[in-house]
Image (cartoon, helix red, strand yellow):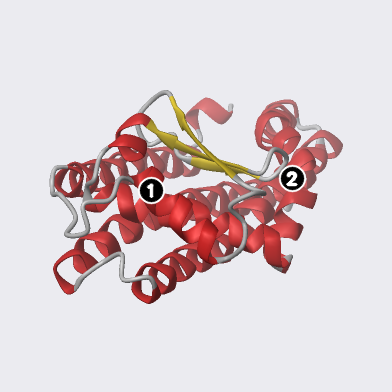
């Protein structure tokens, strides 16, 4: 039975502990710098709009507030930069960093950044694979059904590909954010370290998610070869 398989349980334990550690680090880092006002006195919304104007996208991409904490994202289908309420309205170092990062995705979209196109192309299959792949693989192992296990591996493999493509997309968005903030004079030397810390902490969540997905995929592949 899969419930008693030590390998699966070990991966689950590593993933659980790792996720708690990374999320704790992110919240601690974000919490520290969300209380620190940035030198320019700009809110996240103002920073997002300034970067969009500087790149000729002010009339194409909207900036709005969204509910929740750390729910910031860029929606390419609506050309929308959505910032959580605190990041939208507060002039903190964290708000500047997060807003610039999300606009970085808008810049990727406008410039046809290839990994972003690949990620969007894989997304529909990845959504199915992340939900149904592990379930099919687990039942395949439990029932000794190799075909079911292989189908689960293929579907979950699409989700893993999505996670891997996400890494360069997120790192590039942060790189663009740093470049824009420096060129526009949005961050000073006093703010830059905090902005970088927030973005690095956020990037760790994607690295952890990708590492966990890879471990599970390798486990399922090893089970299929038994």
Asked if 112 appears above or below 45 in the picture, the reply is below
Q: In the rendered structure, which disc, 1 or 2, sits on the residue that comes first in sequence?
A: 1
Residue 40 position within the rendered picture, expressed as x and y whole percent measured from the top left: 22, 58
**Structural distance between the alpha carbons of marks 1 and 2:** 45 Å
Residue 4 lies left or right of residue 133; in this view the side is left
Instruction: Give the quadrant of residue 161.
Output: bottom right
User: Residue at left 82%, top 34%?
Assistant: 148
Is residue 206 visible from the viewing direction of this image?
no
Residue 37 position within the rendered picture, expressed as x and y whole percent measured from the top left: 15, 49
Residue 39 lies left or right of residue 200; in this view the side is left
Quarter of the N terminus within the rendering: top right
Residue 35 lies left or right of residue 18; in this view the side is left
Mark 1 neighbour class, 10 Å CA radius: few under 14, some 14 to 19, many 20 or more? some
Is residue 83 visible from the viewing direction of this image?
yes
Front residue (pair 64, 203):
64
Residue ID for mark 2: 153
Q: Tell me the SS state at disc 2.
A: helix
Front residue (pair 28, 51):
51
User: Residue at left 34%, top 56%?
Assistant: 97
Residue 195 position within the rendered picture, expressed as x and y whole percent measured from the top left: 27, 60
Residue ID for mark 1: 46
Mark 2 neighbour class, 10 Å CA radius: few under 14, some 14 to 19, many 20 or more? many
């Amino acid at each position: 039975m899969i419930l008693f398989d030590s390998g699966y349980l070990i991966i689950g334990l590593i993933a659980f502990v790792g996720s708690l550690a990374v999320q704790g680090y992110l919240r601690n880092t974000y919490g520290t710098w969300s209380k620190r006002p940035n030198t320019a006195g700009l809110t996240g919304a103002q920073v997002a709009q300034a970067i969009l104007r500087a790149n000729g996208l002010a009339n194409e991409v909207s900036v709005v507030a969204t509910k929740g904490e750390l729910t910031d994202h860029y929606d390419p289908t609506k050309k929308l930069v959505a910032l959580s309420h605190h990041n939208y309205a507060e002039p903190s170092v964290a708000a500047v960093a997060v807003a610039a990062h999300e606009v970085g995705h808008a810049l990727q979209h406008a410039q046809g950044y290839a990994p972003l196109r690949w990620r969007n192309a894989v997304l529909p299959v990845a959504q199915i694979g992340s939900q149904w792949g592990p379930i099919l693989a687990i039942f395949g192992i439990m029932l000794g059904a190799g075909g079911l296990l292989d189908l689960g591996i293929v579907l979950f493999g699409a989700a893993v590909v999505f996670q891997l493509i996400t890494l360069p997309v997120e790192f590039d968005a942060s790189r663009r954010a740093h470049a824009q903030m420096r060129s526009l004079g949005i961050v000073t030397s006093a703010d830059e370290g905090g902005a970088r810390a927030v973005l690095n902490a956020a990037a760790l969540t994607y690295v952890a998610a990708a590492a966990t997905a890879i471990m599970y995929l390798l486990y399922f592949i090893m089970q299929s070869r038994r």
